[in-house]
Image (cartoon, helix red, strand yellow):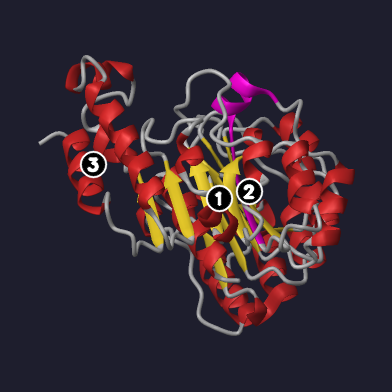
Amino acid sequence: RTYLELVLCVLSSVRNNRNLQKLSLFGDISILQQHGSISNTYLGKVDPDGKKIKQIQQLFEEILGNSRQLKWLSCGFMLQIVTPTSLSSLSNPIANTMEHLSLLDNHIPGNTTLITAVELERFVNLRSLALDFCDFTAEMARVLADSNHVPLHRLSLLIHNISIMHKSLENMPEDENWKALTRNSTNLRVYIMAFNVKSDDMLRILKPSIPLERIHFDSYITCVSGAVVDLISRQYDKFLTHFILMNDVIDMSGFPDLSDNRNEDPLVLLAWRCTRLSLLAVHGYTVWAHNLIAIARLRGSDLKVLEVTEESIDFDQGELADQDVDPVHNLIEQVSLGLGRPWHAVMDIELFSVFTEPTRHFYREMQSFSEGI
């Protein structure tokens, strides 16, 4: 059976279920990648006339149309299941009482969006929302800031370089939109994952009034700059709890060093300024041993997770020159002392908690982040 036939089978089994309260669909891209590229060439082979995709889209709309108790609708990276007209199948009473909505698909052709600001007006009871960042416009922020909306508690945004290329950042919320939104939603917290996004774009996106609690950079094309890390530590010091830096850029000259030409290392400053920081994970950026010790001492036992891959750690000449001290043993000892618990570097990248396909990681984190209200 092909993947599409399995999707049809699953959706058919719930099409008339009026008791459905939570519908969460995640398209496992890795399954599709076994068939080669997740592109129209694969779909062209298994669904040459597009009939199965059409059936799947109709089934999804039927499920929405038949639902009477749906409170949570989450659809992530399910190839072309959600269309710009899907949500119109929801009756007004259901849209009015929906508490969570996530619509994510980075394979939408051109600059199509899955939900408009006008459509969002029906979702007055929404407590958590997850969207592609380019779909989250200033107009949407205005709709959510309206007093007839219950306060929004969680907002998860995926920023993807492909999306920026096709859609642009012209309609994104400005700082005044974020201010208005947080006035209505005082407990709002934001989770951002940026995938292959250029630092210049990040500097434009990161407005001061975003109540940013978690940020995750993942890339194999471009690296985050020290300026971006510095901006995050200055603007979100009261909110930031999770900071993840992943880099798989193949560069023979070694990993990028965020502290290059700076008096202070941006990661140390982040640990110093962001007093609520509880998770810091780094792979593919140079982390100097003495800075890692400083981070552990600054945040102590409040830093519940400190994950750094072994190959990311470097020692300066002074540490290596001291014949009496084994630098690796000293690092482990000092970081463990700082954190108040045994610590060691992550020896195998596959043991890294963040080491999953980025969309899968985002979807999983977004779900738990949204449930944690």
In the image, taking residue 203 as reference, residue 13 lies left or right, namely left
**Bounds of the magenta span?**
154-168
Q: Residue at x 79, y 39 (%)?
A: 173
The residue that label 1 is drawn on is 92
Q: Residue at x 82, y 64 (%)?
A: 273
The one of 90 and 289 positioned closer to us in this rendering: 90
Callout 1: few (<14), some (14-19), or many (20+) C-alpha neighbours within 10 Å? few
The residue that label 2 is drawn on is 122
Q: Amino acid at mark 2?
A: Arg
Q: Residue at x 23, y 41 (%)?
A: 7
Q: Earlier in the sequence, mark 2 or mark 1?
A: 1
The residue that label 3 is drawn on is 7
> Looking at the rendered structure, which numbered label has been put on residue 210?
none
Q: Residue furthest bottom?
A: 340
In the image, taking residue 47 as reference, residue 340 lies left or right, namely right
How many numbered tags mark residues here? 3
The one of 274 and 176 positioned closer to us in this rendering: 176
In the image, taking residue 296 as reference, residue 27 lies left or right, namely left
Q: Amino acid at mark 1?
A: Asn
Q: CA distance from mark 2 to mark 1?
A: 7 Å
Q: Amino acid at mark 3?
A: Val
Q: Position of residue 44 (x, y in %)?
A: 24, 16
Q: Secondary structure at mark 1?
A: helix
Q: Residue furthest right?
A: 176
Q: Secondary structure at mark 2?
A: loop
Callout 2: few (<14), some (14-19), or many (20+) C-alpha neighbours within 10 Å? many
The one of 118 and 131 positioned closer to us in this rendering: 118
Q: Quadrant of residue 177?
A: top right
Q: CA distance from mark 3 to mark 1?
A: 27 Å
Q: Earlier in the sequence, mark 3 or mark 1?
A: 3
